[in-house]
Image (spheres, rainbow, N blue to C red):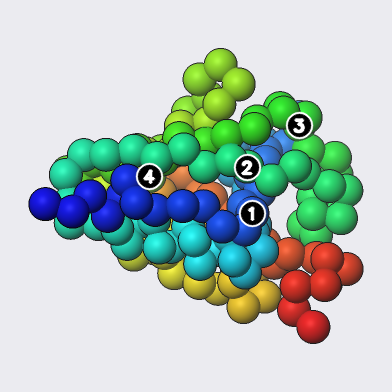
Amino acid sequence: MRDWVAEWRQEGQIFVWRYPKNSKHAGEWHFTGDPAGCRSFRNLIDRMAGGETCHRTWTLGRMTDAIWAVPNYGEPRHDGFTSMRIVFDPDKRDLTMEVTEARLVMSLGNAQLRHLRAAFSDIEVGRGDFGIGTSDRRKPDIWMFWPMPWSAGFYR
């Protein structure tokens, strides 16, 4: 049987950050990406969807002042994450993000996949400034999605 997930190759960039504990946005994860990165990320989770437990590693883009300035929440934490492991478990109900050493681990399952996919579709075409709930719980954690800065030249 062909392993579509193993054949996937990253294109473009995705950026992930968070804010210091003294910020009202400290508990949130924030995302953006260039169009190629958003398409590539969606392609990866499409390949994972409906399959067995698997994972891939995404090399994260390096944060710039222009990127974190889009939400205008002040300077983010300088965590220095260079990669994010994306773990798919078809039965997982929530989207989660954990910090393991210098790497992020995003876990997802079929239940919340469409929300994450839709968020990266919006970012790809320059929309943003919205959040998605990470679960069906009454007060889920929120992940925020932002457009790439126009100064980056991706949407001209």
Say what secondary structure mark 3 lies in.
loop
- Mark drawn on residue 124: none
Whether residue 85 sits left or right of residue 35 in the image: it is left
What residue did someone put label 3 on?
A: 77
Residue 34 place in picture, x, y as percent: 66, 64
- Seen from the viewer's position, the closer of residues 6 and 121 is 6
Nearer to us: label 3 or label 2: 2
Ranked by sequence position, the earlier of labels 3 and 4 is: 3
Residue 44 place in picture, x, y as percent: 39, 56
Visible residue check, residue 48: no
- Mark drawn on residue 95: 4
Quadrant position of residue 82: top right
Ranked by sequence position, the earlier of labels 4 and 2 is: 2
What residue did someone put label 1 on?
A: 13
CA–CA distance in space, label 1 to label 2: 6 Å
Q: Please state which amino acid type lies under the numbered disc 4.
A: Leu
CA–CA distance in space, label 3 to label 1: 19 Å
Label 4 crowd (10 A; few <14 / some 14-19 / many >=20): many
- Seen from the viewer's position, the closer of residues 59 and 91 is 59
Say what secondary structure mark 1 lies in.
loop
CA–CA distance in space, label 3 to label 2: 15 Å
Q: Please state which amino acid type lies under the numbered disc 1.
A: Gln
Indicate whether 87 appears above or below 46: above
Ranked by sequence position, the earlier of labels 3 and 2 is: 2
Label tally: 4
Residue 110 place in picture, x, y as percent: 24, 54
